[in-house]
Image: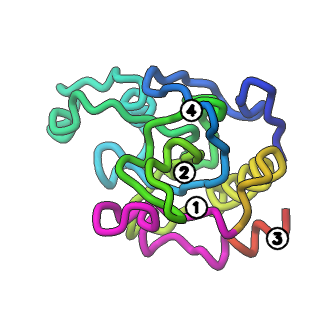
Amino acid sequence: MTVICAEGWLQDAERVPSPNYGPRPEESDISLLVVHNISLPPGQYGGGYIQQFFQNRLSTDVHPYFAEIKGLQVSSHLLIERSGHLVQFVPFSQRAWHAGVSVFGGRDNCNDFSIGIELEGTDDSPYTAQQYDILAKTAVSLMQYYPGITPERIVGHCDIAPGRKTDPGAAFDWALFRRLLEQV
């Protein structure tokens, strides 16, 4: 497990600060963990493009898809690369812009009360053993630090934005992830 400092940063994560965040609502509680996926360009891994995207530094000259997403200002709290390398963009105390229009348990605006973790991947490509391992360890650390997050309150982006989002997709093995949670 990894340590979370009082400012909301994971000790074991590489810090790559994103400007795409804001304050959480005054009365907000952190009580939801949302699992996403991302690959840039779509279906390709590596290259540091996700980090550049979350920092608004993605060059549109590198790939035609990058011109399509130019101007989007998004971020997640964390990214777990294929290798298991963990990157943090926004401290947990702040509201990352990862969920968009969303609802969970009758509450709108899931960004207000959630933490977002991106897995480098696609809906239909298997995730790596390293990603599952780091995701489970990180989730347990987050559940200990934020007791409002329980195993039942760890969901996919598809669960909070049905019809609009599909990630982490059919390739994500929820049963394996739940078993790993119990073993940490």
N-terminal label among 3 and 4: 4
Which residue is the site of mark 3? 182
Colour theme:
rainbow
N-terminal label among 4 and 1: 4
Q: Quick check: 67 left or right of 101?
A: left
Which residue is the site of mark 1? 128
Is residue 30 in the magenta section? no
Which residue is the site of mark 2? 82
- Look at the numbered discs 2 and 1 and tell me whether their residues touch, using CB distance below 8 Å: yes
Which residue is the site of mark 4? 24
Q: Quick check: 53 left or right of 28?
A: left
User: Around disc 4, counting alpha carbons within 10 Å, would you say few (fewer than 14), some (14 to 19), or many (20 or more)?
Assistant: some
User: Which amino acid type corresponds to the residue marked 2 in the rendered image?
Assistant: Arg
User: Around disc 2, counting alpha carbons within 10 Å, would you say few (fewer than 14), some (14 to 19), or many (20 or more)?
Assistant: some
User: Around disc 3, counting alpha carbons within 10 Å, would you say few (fewer than 14), some (14 to 19), or many (20 or more)?
Assistant: few
User: Which amino acid type corresponds to the residue marked 1 in the rendered image?
Assistant: Thr
